[in-house]
Image: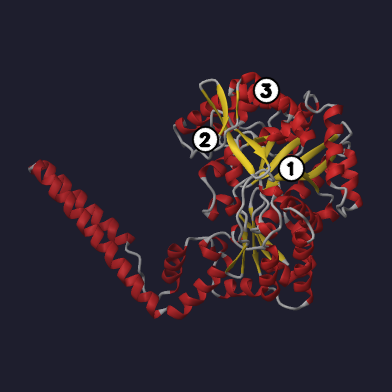
């Protein structure tokens, strides 16, 4: 097995915000707390330890809930030790979160959790007097079923078809027997296929709801590494969040602070960044069985959209005190909820996730909750030995294989052609000639400047068109080589996207079996901040 890396920026698949963060551009410094370098965790530990939120009572409540959630889970001794350790003042968490995607969804589900496990281990080596627990926070309160009801397998979409309302974690497994029948035919009959089918069957057909099924699956994959899985949709955890729910309802602090931050991000002179999420005046849902709807404030009356439920100010605050489990944070409030509940130091997420975390620091400061270190999860391109060999034989570099389709083909056609189909020099000569014409027109009759410019544009467009036609003709001459190159890129970048955003882990499990996750644990380095190319 061998590996290589490429910078996130050179892949062309990551936003300017994330690339600038990794380069620690000064303009972004106000939007995060500390950069994820190993030496910065000591200060983060000190800050979190002294927070009023990391109290003995908070820790006891957390451990109590986790023990209840693990009653029927065949977890490892290491996982149970990690849960017990959360009572101790010197224990902190490293956390990632993810939706309850069917059969884990895309590959990066694995990379998030492996990054979390490996960072916890790395911190233990650096700070041996402390304990670091890897945590997977299940997004059980999400309600967008269409985002999680499928996964891709060898170019096919395996989909769970049913109607769904309310929080996805509470969904019954209705309809998943039909999905299992599909997989039974798709996975094959060898030993690795039987393991995968058993994993799906035990997770989804032997549990009552999607939250329990996902917990079983994640535990089965990662229990040997001490992963702790938490479902935030629990009354005892929501009790810890009551003061912040009331703050949100009465003062709308998140709306004010995040709106201010969004304007600052948009107004940056050097690089205005795309805003990932926009806050609502109240960033909470009301949650009951088969119901998760927004809370809005209209004329001093709090209402639940699409229902007849409403309260005045005193009534809704009483509802919060008596039934905190009925109040569900949205994308703006969920990070705060997580950081209130957990003794957390670092959140590990993808580029889109970190983008909205950058919008939250001023809000965290306003409600006096320590802002975690933000770490971009590991990204990986897995190549088989055969694919790596083909890349070498076709002389395709790591930078080239990441190019978008047309740029990739054009670059390779130019490289392997025995004629030069690059009119850059001709365009440069033409531009210089027109500079002389501009000068001549300026000295004689300025009214001709427009005509000269029009002629320059026309001739440059003509060269572009001719260049493209010659490239198209040359592609036909080299069609066999172009076909082999594009087929290889299609394998590595399905649907012209990153492999990790499309492919399900089952494809690689059928190839590598129970060595898949250990190999990822061995090779992913969360603080390296580079995209990993892994030849397996």
For residue 502, what is the image quadrant?
bottom right
In three-dimensional space, the C-alpha distance between marks 1 and 3, rounded to whole angstroms, equals 30 Å
- Give the quarter of the figure containing the C terminus: bottom right
Q: Is residue 525 visible?
A: no
Vertical side of 60 occupied by 429: above or below: below
Q: Secondary structure at mark 2?
A: loop
Q: Residues within 10 Å of mark 2 (few under 14, many from 20)?
A: some
Residue beneath disc 2? 278
Q: x%, y% of residue 516?
A: 75, 64
Of residue 406 and residue 356, the one placed in the foreground of this image is: 356
Of residue 15 and residue 99, the one placed in the foreground of this image is: 99
Residue beneath disc 1? 95
Which circle, 1 or 2, is nearer the viewer?
Answer: 2
Q: Residue at x 68, y 54 (%)?
A: 109
For residue 469, what is the image quadrant?
bottom left
Residue beneath disc 3? 317
Q: Secondary structure at mark 1?
A: strand
- N-term mark: 2 or 3: 2
Of residue 66 and residue 519, the one placed in the foreground of this image is: 66
Q: x%, y% of residue 462?
A: 23, 62
Which circle, 2 or 3, is nearer the viewer?
Answer: 3
Q: Secondary structure at mark 3?
A: helix
Number of numbered discs: 3
Which circle, 1 or 3, is nearer the viewer?
Answer: 3
- N-term mark: 1 or 2: 1
In three-dimensional space, the C-alpha distance between marks 1 and 2, rounded to whole angstroms, equals 24 Å
Vertical side of 400 occupied by 242: above or below: above
């Amino acid at each position: 097995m061998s590996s290589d890396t490429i910078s996130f920026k050179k892949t062309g698949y990551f936003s300017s915000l994330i690339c600038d963060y990794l380069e620690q551009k000064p303009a972004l410094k106000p939007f995060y707390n500390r950069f994820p370098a190993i030496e910065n965790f000591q200060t983060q530990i000190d800050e979190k330890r002294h927070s009023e939120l990391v109290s003995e009572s908070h820790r006891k409540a957390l451990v109590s809930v986790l023990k209840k959630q693990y009653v029927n889970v065949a977890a490892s001794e290491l996982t149970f030790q990690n849960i017990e350790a959360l009572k101790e003042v010197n224990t902190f968490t490293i956390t990632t979160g993810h939706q309850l995607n069917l059969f884990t969804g895309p590959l990066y589900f694995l990379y998030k959790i492996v990054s979390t496990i490996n960072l916890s281990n790395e911190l233990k080596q650096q700070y041996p007097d402390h304990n670091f627990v890897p945590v997977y926070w299940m997004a059980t309160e999400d309600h967008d079923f269409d985002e999680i009801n499928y996964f891709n397998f060898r170019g096919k979409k395996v989909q769970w078809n049913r109607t769904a309302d309310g929080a996805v974690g509470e969904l019954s497994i209705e309809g998943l027997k039909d999905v299992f029948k599909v997989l039974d035919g798709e996975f094959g009959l060898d030993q690795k296929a039987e393991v995968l089918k058993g994993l799906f069957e035990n997770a989804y057909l032997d549990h009552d709801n999607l939250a329990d099924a996902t917990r079983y699956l994640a535990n089965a994959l990662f229990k040997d590494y001490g992963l702790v899985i938490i479902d935030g949709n629990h009354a005892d955890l929501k009790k810890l969040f009551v003061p912040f729910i009331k703050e949100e309802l009465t003062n709308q602090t998140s709306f004010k602070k995040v709106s201010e931050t969004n304007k600052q991000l948009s107004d940056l002179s050097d690089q205005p960044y795309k805003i990932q999420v926009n806050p609502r005046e109240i960033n909470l849902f009301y949650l009951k069985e088969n119901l998760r709807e927004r809370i809005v404030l209209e004329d001093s009356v709090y209402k639940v959209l699409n229902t007849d439920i409403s309260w005045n100010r005193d009534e809704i605050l009483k509802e919060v005190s008596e039934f905190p489990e009925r109040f569900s944070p949205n994308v703006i409030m969920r990070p705060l909820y997580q950081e209130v509940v957990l003794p957390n130091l670092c959140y590990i997420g993808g580029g889109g996730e970190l983008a909205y975390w950058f919008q939250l620091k001023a809000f965290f400061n306003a409600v006096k909750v320590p802002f975690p270190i933000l770490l971009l999860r590991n990204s990986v391109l897995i190549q088989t030995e055969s694919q790596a060999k083909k890349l070498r034989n076709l002389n395709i570099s790591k930078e080239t294989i990441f190019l978008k389709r047309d740029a990739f083909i054009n670059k390779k056609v130019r490289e392997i052609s025995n004629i030069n189909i690059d009119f850059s020099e001709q365009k440069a000569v033409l531009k210089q000639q027109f500079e002389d014409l501009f000068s001549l027109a300026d000295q004689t009759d300025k009214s001709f400047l427009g005509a000269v410019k029009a002629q320059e544009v026309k001739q440059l467009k003509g060269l572009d068109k001719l260049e493209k036609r010659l490239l198209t003709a040359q592609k036909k001459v080299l069609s066999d080589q172009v076909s082999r190159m594009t087929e290889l890129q299609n394998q590595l970048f399905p649907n012209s996207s990153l492999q990790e955003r499309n492919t399900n882990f089952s494809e690689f499990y059928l190839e590598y079996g129970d060595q898949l996750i250990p190999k990822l644990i061995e090779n992913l380095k969360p603080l390296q901040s580079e995209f990993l190319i892994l030849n397996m």
